[in-house]
Image (cartoon, rainbow, N blue to C red):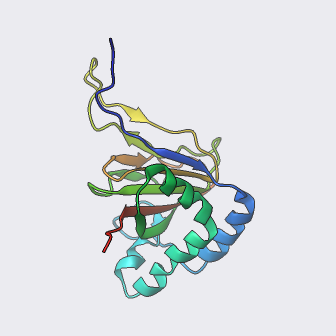
């Protein structure tokens, strides 16, 4: 009798009314330009959250939630948790841009909304199972099937990376970290 000892859930949400919401999101993102820092092989506005622009950057979260409220309510009902987004940023991967393997901490959830993404031109994030294959003793990787307007939410401790963009078409995402909101 085979049973499952452990499993790691993830959440995939297809954003309703994506084309309309994408227009609103793109307009919002014009206020949060991306740039390339020497330590990264991609463009992002994440470093802004640690600079003098922190107040302007933190405005991204409520404006984002205003657009995508229904999708987050769906997720929160599913996990039955009181979660709050603590950080949010966008990333653009031009040709040859990639991101090394990393995670977002040991608690909470991390999400990715695929904003500009073409399955024929781009690869989605690749996730690493936290333990080796039980019989083969090798790493196990997973790529979910995604399209523009797909929101993927995983536990923050899951290691993942972004394969190199081999196309001339930029790949853009919104990423965020969520933690359980403390009840007072």
Q: Quadrant of the N terminus?
A: top left
Q: Is residue 55 above or below residue 128?
A: below
Coordinates of residue 181 in the picture (x, y in percent): 35, 67
> Does the image show residue 109?
yes
Residue 25 x/y as whole percent: 64, 69
Q: Is residue 3 above or below residue 32?
A: above
Q: Nearer the viewer, residue 125 or 88?
A: 88
- Residue at 27% x, 17% y is 135
Query: In the current view of this chain or complex, which residue is farthest to the front?
Result: 184
Direction from residue 29 to residue 143 in the image, left or right: left
Q: Is residue 172 visible?
A: no
Please provide percent x and percent y for residue 124: 52, 45
The image quarter containing residue 105 is bottom left
Q: Position of residue 73 (x, y in %)?
A: 55, 60
| Residue drawn at (35%, 31%) of the image | 140
Q: Is residue 103 left or right of residue 44?
A: left
Q: In percent of the image, x 47 and y 68: which residue is there? A: 89
The residue furthest top is 1
Number of marks in the rendered image: 0
35 versus 132 height, above or below: below
Name which quarter of the figure residue 119 lies in: top right
Give whichever of 127, 33 is nearer the camera.
127
Q: Quadrant of the C terminus?
A: bottom left
Q: Image check: 90 left or right of 118?
A: left
The residue depicted at 44 percent of the width and 44 percent of the height is 10
């Amino acid at each position: 009798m085979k049973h499952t000892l452990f499993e790691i859930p993830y959440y995939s949400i297809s954003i309703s009314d994506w084309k309309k919401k994408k227009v609103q999101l793109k307009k919002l993102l014009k206020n949060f330009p991306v740039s390339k820092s020497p330590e990264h092989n991609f463009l992002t506005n994440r470093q802004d959250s640690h600079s003098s622009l922190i107040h302007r950057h933190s405005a991204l979260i409520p404006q984002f939630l205003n657009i995508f409220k229904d999708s987050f309510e769906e997720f929160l009902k599913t996990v039955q948790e009181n979660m709050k987004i603590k950080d949010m940023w966008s990333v653009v991967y031009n040709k040859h841009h990639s991101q090394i393997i990393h995670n977002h901490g040991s608690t909470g959830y991390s999400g990715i909304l695929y904003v500009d993404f073409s399955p024929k031109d781009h690869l989605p994030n690749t996730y690493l199972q936290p333990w080796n294959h039980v019989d083969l003793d090798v790493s196990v990787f997973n790529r979910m099937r995604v399209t523009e307007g797909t929101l993927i939410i995983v536990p923050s401790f899951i290691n993942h990376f972004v394969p190199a963009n081999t196309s001339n078409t930029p790949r853009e995402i919104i990423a965020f970290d969520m933690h359980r909101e403390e009840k007072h």
